[in-house]
Structures are given as structure tokens and as C-alpha cells.
Image: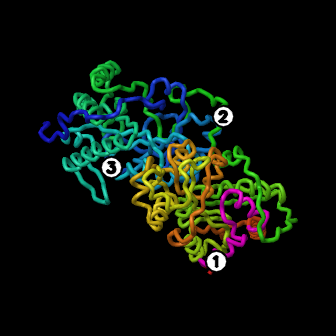
Amino acid sequence: MFKDFIGVGVPSRPGSRARHLPFHPCMNHEAHQEVARLHLPVAPKCNIHCSYCQRMVDASRMHEICPGLSAVILTPAEALAKTEAFLSQWGDGAVVGIAGPGDPLANEETFETLELIRSQYSRVTLCLCTNGLELPESVPALRRLGLEHLTVTINAVDPDVAERIHSRVRIKRRIIRGIRGARLLIQRQLDGLTAAVDRGMHVKVNTVVIPGVNEFHVETVAREAAARSASIFNLMPLIPRKHTADRSPPSECHIKLLRQRCKKHLPVFDRCKQCRADAEGVPGRPNALPIKREPLMNRRRFLKASGIAMTGTLSAPAIGLAADFRGESLQLWSCGGLAEAFIPANKLYEQRTGCAVSYTGAFAAALGKSLLGNAQTEVFAPRVLELAKRLKTQGKMLRFWPLCFTRYVLVTPKGNPAGIRGIEDLKRPDVRTVLSPGASPPGGEATLGILKKAGVLEAAQKHAVRNGDCVQRDVAAIVNGEGDVAVVEQRITRLPGVVNRVEVIDIPEDFIPGKPVPFVIGIMKWAKNSKLAQDFVDFIRSAEGQAFFSAAGFIPAVSEEGRRLTEKYGVKDA
């Protein structure tokens, strides 16, 4: 029976990290009683067939508690709104995850949702549960999003056993059945587990205990998980459903015995509630109420905390606004990087006109993809000119105008201890660089392009003391003196924790690949009141409105420099 067993006798890898259990409610017994978690049901599709699984979206079954069950499926935008409401209640110690009702990695909406949340909440703990079939190629993207907690369900490491549980798998549009599918699933689960651990993730391995199928095999699964440095192991008793409806679940005594055997290999979590795909709250105290805590610093609160002053003179005349839109509302979406400018600008506009501005600032690619699909908003400010042109070609954006440009600069610790004078100094062997090659656009790729065009990329990579995946987190290495210099968008230097704590050195435009990144603002066809939408755009593009963008580190389109860039690079509505 075990002739095809994959990975027998794999030793613990030398140098593997100690199994320090994170303070996560599904991995740590103490956290299970204290930390709230939110499951976002954004992933309806699955890529394997499990005999015990019955995915359901049914609002009438709210009383049932089992994996794969949800009352609704949320869109990424709805998930972001749900997350904001949840974190405002439970504070920055809470955890946000995706656990179905299908497999998260088989759904593009999973990555869109994580992008949206990370763009607004840079410090929130994100997690994800998966069957592991598509894990090996997904690990880099998950780490780029700052996801450090992962659960992988591995029910067998013997293909003969796995075939009895998983009759088929689907990968790259191919369905593979029987022993071949089981063998592929196991290999990819173990490869994905290894890759996740190697990238610094805390990984819990779940195993569903099915009497008569894998009950005498679970210790072998635990041994294999331990050999690959999984953090913790969790045994889940079968909930008889679908093709296992005629089987009895394992007794509590049987589960306790199996847990004792598995503990010889790695820590075992014994508090699992086998949660729904839309679960929320403290798992160990389901009736617990939110505790008033200091709220998580999302982009809105970043700006409030920073106390950015509205300074600087722009050449365009201020527009006197006398419009009265009391009782009306306007929906505004923008690239997340513009939030530090839009939030105070929106507030002033609301005070002036009585209009309520409903604002979402998130990852531009995710918002753009939503609008190219079925999503709707009234005013949109993307960072990609081509996206605005595409939306207009489709008849979704009626007209757009230049808004601002981003500017790249060098940043050094306060006082510039390494004596950096310009980008050419990054060739010096004594200069410690901080890079973010894994950061989302325009961070990683654009900054590496600047270094390459300046002829210093090879030296900067050689002398890098940090190669991260989030510019906002990586710039902390400059603030605390760990590194000597980094290339960032100037807006980063205006954020709390960075403003007034770094020195800024200009980068010549000649070293900027392509053209400076333009932002535009456009009116969408769904605007309920076209006069209101136009009035808002006029305010944002006035000298008064553009002052907010100048203060946030952008080049306003109405400034002399902005007008030069607009003309030079043809940033206009065709």
C-alpha cells in the first residue's frame, strides 16, 4: 500500500527555524481566547474534489458551523468594506483571513482582496487556508503582500490513501483523476509547504481524520510536516457530509490518542472550531464583544496622525466654489497612494458644499480590473494613463484631466551620515542600500529601473542590506540607520514615522525610465449628478485642491512643473 509513498524518511532540514508559535488564534492556544479573526468569503471556486467537503452559499444555514459554508460571496470591494468595519471594532490585534468557501488560491479575487486590504492596512495580520495544489507558485505573491500565516490541509502523504479522499484535481484547466491526481496533489502540497517555510511563513498543517480511510496514517502526515518545519499540526474530526455521510466521525478519545502520537513530531493545536468561511469574532469566546482598542492606522488615520500642513504656492488661481450639494453624495475611487491627499481634500469639499464624499483608495490594478468588469463608481483617479484611456474607449469614463505626477527621490537617514550627494554615490562599496524588489508597482520595478539607467544597479544590489517587498515597511531601515540610502516616491517621505526623519535628495529626470508616472482624474458614466461630479473635479484641480497633493509629495498638474510634464508626455484626454 505504501509503495508510492512520497517523502518517507525526509529528515528535518539543517538550520530550519525553531517552531515559535505566532500569536494567532488558530495557531496559539492563548491567542485562541483573546484574538479576533475575520474570514472573508471571496473564493467560491475549488480545484480539487474532496469526499467530505460540501461547499454551500446559503444564508438560511447561519446556525451551522463547518468549513466550506458561507451566507454570501463578497466582492473584493465589499470585503475591504467588511474589513474596515471589523478592524474599527476589534483593533489592530485582529487577524483577517480568507478560507473559502472554495480554495483561495484557485480564485483571482483572493489576491485582489489581499491587495486592497494591504493597500489600506499596512500592519494588519493576514492569513489564508488552502489545499496546497497551487501553493508552490503562489508563495512569492503571498509574501509580497506581507502574508506570514498559512494553513495547508494535507490529508495524506501516500497516494493510495489520498486517492480515496481526493478523486480528482484540476490544474491549469486539466483534470487529473485517480492515483496520478493524488500523487500530483501530495507533491505540490509538500513543495508548497517547503517553499512557504523557506520564505519565512508560519505554516499550520490541517488533517481531516476519516475513520477507515486515513486514521492510522495521520502520524505519518505529522512526521512529514515536521520534517519540513511546519509550525504546528491540527487534527480535524470528520464532519459526515456528501460522500462521507454514511461514516461516523472519530470519537473524542480517538482524536486525543492521535494527537498524543502526533505531538512526538511537532506541536499540536487542539482548539480548532472548524470555522465557517465567513466566521468572525474570537474563536475561543464566540459570544465575546469587541473591546475598545486603539484603531489600526490605515491610510485615513495615517494622514490625521501626521498633521501634514497645507503649504506651497501653485500658479493656478483658486476657484471660488459656491455650489450647494447638501444631502447629496459622491462616490470616489483612487489609487491608494493618493489617499494622503484626497482625504483632507474631500473633507474640505464636504465642509464647503454639504456633499458626502464616499472614498475608497486602494491598489490601482485591483480597482481598474473591477471597473473594466462590472464595478461602478462616479469619479475615478487612477495612476495609469492607459487605464483611463481604456475606460473611456469602453464608454465607462466620460472625460479625464491631468491630476498630478509622482516624483522619485533618494532618502538617507537624518543628517545623511554616509555623505550621499547623488545617485552616482550608490556605486561606492561603503554605501549600504535598501531595496524593495518585491514591492507592488510602481515601487519595485520602477526603482530598479532608475538604478539600472543610472548605472548603479549591480553595485546597489551587491551592497544591499535589505531586499524587501513593501516600500513603506522597508524605508524604516533608512529611518533607523540600518541602511544609508534608498530610492522611493517622494510621497513616502511625507508619511508618519518618516516625515522629518530622513534627508531627501533629488534624482535627475534623465534617470527616470520611460516617463514620470502620471495620475489623472475622470468622471464616470455612473455619476448620478454630473454637475456635482464636475464641481468636485474642478475643486480638486484648483490651486486650493492641488495644494493637498503638493503637501503629500506629488507634483500638482497645475504647477509650472506639472504643466511642463503634461505637455512633454501628452497627458491629456484624447
Residues rendered magenta in the picture: 541-569
Q: Position of residue 404 (x, y in %)?
A: 66, 67
Residue position for label 1: 572
Q: Is residue 113 visible?
A: no
Residue found at x 47% / y 66%: 454
Instruction: Using a 10 Å C-alpha cutoff, classify the residue at mark 3 as few (fewer than 14 neighbours), some (14 to 19) or many (20 or more).
Output: some
Q: Amino acid at mark 2?
A: Glu
Q: Is residue 110 left or right of residue 218?
A: right
Q: Earlier along the polypeptide chain: callout 1 or callout 2?
A: 2
Which label belongs to residue 136? 3
Helix, strand or loop: magenta stretch: helix
Q: Quadrant of the N terminus?
A: top left
Residue found at x 30% / y 38%: 154
Q: Position of residue 562 (x, y in %)?
A: 67, 71
**Marks 1 and 2, how far apart at CA:** 43 Å
Here the colouring is rainbow
Q: Position of residue 472 (x, y in %)?
A: 55, 49
Which label belongs to residue 294? 2
Where disc 1 sits, the SS reads: loop
Q: Earlier along the polypeptide chain: callout 2 or callout 3?
A: 3
